[in-house]
Amino acid sequence: MNKHQNLALAFFLIAFSQMTNAQSLTRADSLVKQLHNPADKKIMVTAHRGDWRNAPENSLAAFKNAIKMGVDIIELDLAQTKDGVIVIMHDQTIDRTTNGKGKPGDFTLSEIKSFRLKNGLGRVTDHTIPTLQEVMLLVKGKVLINLDKSYPYYNEAYAILKNTGTLKQAIFKTDERYAEVKKRYPSILDSITFMAVIDLDKPDARQILTNYQQYMHPVAFELNFKTDTSSLLRDNKFINTNGSRIWINSLWASLNAGHDDDTAVDKGNTRDSWDWLIAHGATMIQTDRPKELLLYLKQKGLHR
């Protein structure tokens, strides 16, 4: 083989290696990169409890639907069984969402799997309460997960995420202050992707937020507000500058002062809902209308 052939082979091997590496990157890898880039202005869409309008909330089916829909993040809620298994359940009891009664902690995993989830009309389905491990194996490489109601179970969730190879895909969250979180979880806090929840109606909201950014630099701040008069809704560019994204919920009005999904979809008024949230810094929106929000953002060129 002559010099020119060797050179051509070298270029081919380099190009093949680059192509192989690109193909090995998953959608989740791209989303993780986007999540950690606070300067990125594309909106990341979070499906609240999955696609609960077409499948039981917090079910594997609801999560599968949300993935197919193209959401970036799925929000779910953690609970623990009597035998210490982390399962997905929003309420303190299983009464509303299943054909059983009692707290998740009243049952072993085997017992809790015997119950069936209800759909949005209250009808019993064939779907069962999933475990966090089942969910993470389902979403691996596909989408990010927001772990709501997870604060009591950080260590257990961390172990599951490590074992399933999905640690980078999960966002831990809490409304506790930095000092309390650091005291309770000193060994893992620097190893997880973390979002702090801030109630803007509290007089010390800015101090809580800046304290977090001083010591920890959360990947995002979830801003909740019943009224939209907080100065942090007008002056929040420093949040991005200091390395964090802004997450605002478009769910019910008490979380966003009425700039909600229903205003956008039922009233056809996006100016005072989704547009308003984006204009006030949101680059992550948790929604009960993921299909409609995704379509709207794509039409505006605001979603990848």
Image (cartoon, rainbow, N blue to C red):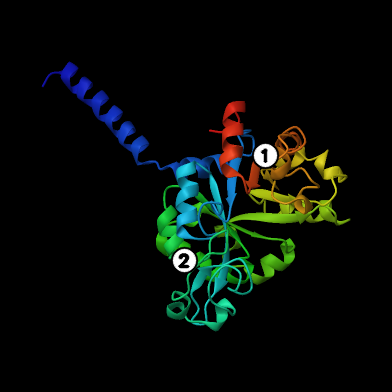
Residue marked by disc 1: 265
* 217 relative position to 134: left or right: right
Res 25 seen here = yes
Structural crowding at the residue carrying mark 1, measured as other residues with C-alpha within 10 Å and reported as few (<14), some (14–19) or many (≥20): some
> For residue 299, what is the image quadrant?
top right
> For residue 19, what is the image quadrant?
top left
- 54 shown above or below 299: below
* Amino acid on which disc 2 is placed: Pro
**Residue that appears at 73% across and 65% down:** 179
The image shows residue 73 at horizontal and vertical percentages of 55, 48
Disc 1 versus disc 2: distance between alpha carbons?
30 Å
The image shows residue 258 at horizontal and vertical percentages of 79, 46
* Amino acid on which disc 1 is placed: Val
**Residue that appears at 48% across and 76% down:** 112
Report the front residue among 235 and 187.
235
Q: Residue furthest top?
A: 4
- 148 shown above or below 41: below
The image shows residue 286 at horizontal and vertical percentages of 64, 48
Residue marked by disc 2: 130
Structural crowding at the residue carrying mark 2, measured as other residues with C-alpha within 10 Å and reported as few (<14), some (14–19) or many (≥20): some
Q: Secondary structure at mark 2?
A: loop
**Residue that appears at 78% across and 53% down:** 254
Report the front residue among 195 and 181.
195
The image shows residue 296 at horizontal and vertical percentages of 61, 32
Res 211 seen here = no
